[in-house]
Amino acid sequence: MVAERACPTTTGPDPVVPQIYRVGSARRELADTVTLEIAPLAGRRPAYGPGQFNMLYVFGVGEIAVSLSGDCTDESRFVHTVRDVGAVSKAIARLEAGATVGLRGPFGIGWPVVAAEGSDVVVVAGGLGLAPLRPAIYHILANRARYGRVTILFGSRNPDDMLFRKELEAWRRNLDISVEVTVDHAHADWRGHVGVVPALVPRAAFDPESTVAFVCGPEVMMRYTASALGEAGVTADRIYLSMERNMKCAIGLCGHCQFGPTFVCKDGPVMPFSRIADIFAMREI
Amino acid sequence: MKGLEDILREHSFFAGFAPEYSALVAGCARNHRFDAGNYLFREGAPANEFFLIRHGTVALEIVAPGQAPIVFATIGEGEIVGAAWLVPPYRWTFDARAVELVRAIGIDAACLRGKCEADHDLGYEMMKRFVPVVVKQLQATQLQILDVYGTR
């Protein structure tokens, strides 16, 4: 009998009012990427599922959507991994232990980890895209017997920019999942794969008719990966992508994150490829 | 012991190939073994052969003066290395290095080009196999050029 480890569900606070959270720790992952552990000043954090996101507010600077990157069964805190690419993310990446931030959430629809039970699972991550997938990987590993073959394919710019490298190495040591890593380019001392992550798809072992794929990374990488999965026989309704748009209200009211007929904040961020395939490559969307 | 024709027939690159064509290609083939660190070919050298990898990993490298070699792709079991033998002036434009022990079948380029000229059906079958390889490599290169994991 397998012990169940599911993410608890609770009703969160008012979705438009930021709650005050304190940074418990800030760990630098890469030169421009930081993982923060944050906990509410009072009470418990709301429950969340793999693939959901929070709105983080740095006082006086602004608010952005950041996906959750920790283990959702750890009810003591939220974990976020942030890359400093803009004014707000740069301010978040500079936060130190003891600092306070405003937080709204969790929001959105996450990875279908329960619906995927009984299937082979292929997780394809590119760069920072591994962060929103990590909670799903934790869930799958904690409930391993419920899934068929599990494959993690990860692409990075080069061996030095590899997010969560120690965890990737630890997952790879698991004998019941397959982990393949590739980098876009490397020096001659790198002995692993070199090439783009979609190229790993045809080399992976899975039953396409019984596979659910979780894909997250830069949008171009996701387009090529969805194409490679399709060529491998995985139907579009079994390929899930985590979309990113300009999330503002996070509850489907303001329309900033509209993507065709959907709002990424409330209809996503995780969406089946079948829902967006026709507009995914459309530059006017 | 398997002959070259059997090995070629079982290689994924030649899946669905007509037996008579396998025999023709096998007539241009020979076995190779490259120890780790040895080169299958070097940039600028005549592209006299292309290689079907049976075992091991090959790193494709470009070298710029004063810089360490940059690996831009790795090729593994079941894949092929090299399309320069198809296009004049038939010279390699990168280095191919064995990352570990590599066992491969080398196909003599002039021999195969001659057979493809003599039998255009064979030539068409070869092109149907090579064009997807070239297109996949082009798509991968497009993604690499975009540097999608970099900050802009």
Image (cartoon, coloured by chain):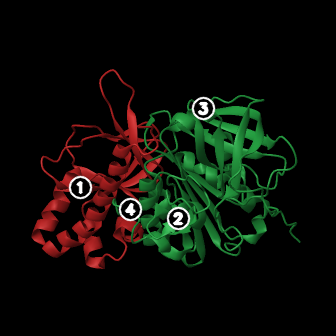
Disc 3 from disc 4: Cα separation: 29 Å
Q: Which one is nearer the viewer's eye here, B136 or B56?
A: B136
Helix, strand or loop under label 3? helix
Up/down of A249 relative to B65, above or below: below
Question: Looking at the image, can residue A200 be seen?
Answer: yes
- Quarter occupied by the N terminus of chain A: bottom right
Q: Earlier in the sequence, mark 2 or mark 4?
A: 2
Residue type, numbered disc 4: Ile
Please name the residue that numbered disc 3 is placed on: A91
> Closer to us: mark 2 or mark 1?
2
Which chain does the numbered disc 4 sit on? A
Q: Which residue is mark 4?
A: A285
Q: Earlier in the sequence, mark 3 or mark 4?
A: 3
Horizontal and vertical percent for residue A252?
A: 58, 63
Relative depth, front residue between A135 and A49: A49
**Alpha-carbon distance for marks 2 and 1?**
57 Å
Residue B60 is left or right of residue A256, and the answer is left
Classify the position of the C terminus of chain A by image quarter. Answer: bottom left
Label 4 CA crowd tier, 10 Å (few <14, some 14–19, many 20+): few
The chain displayed green equals: A
Chain represented in red: B
Q: Amino acid at mark 3?
A: Ala
Residue linked to disc 1: B108
Residue farthest along the top direction in this orientation:
B66
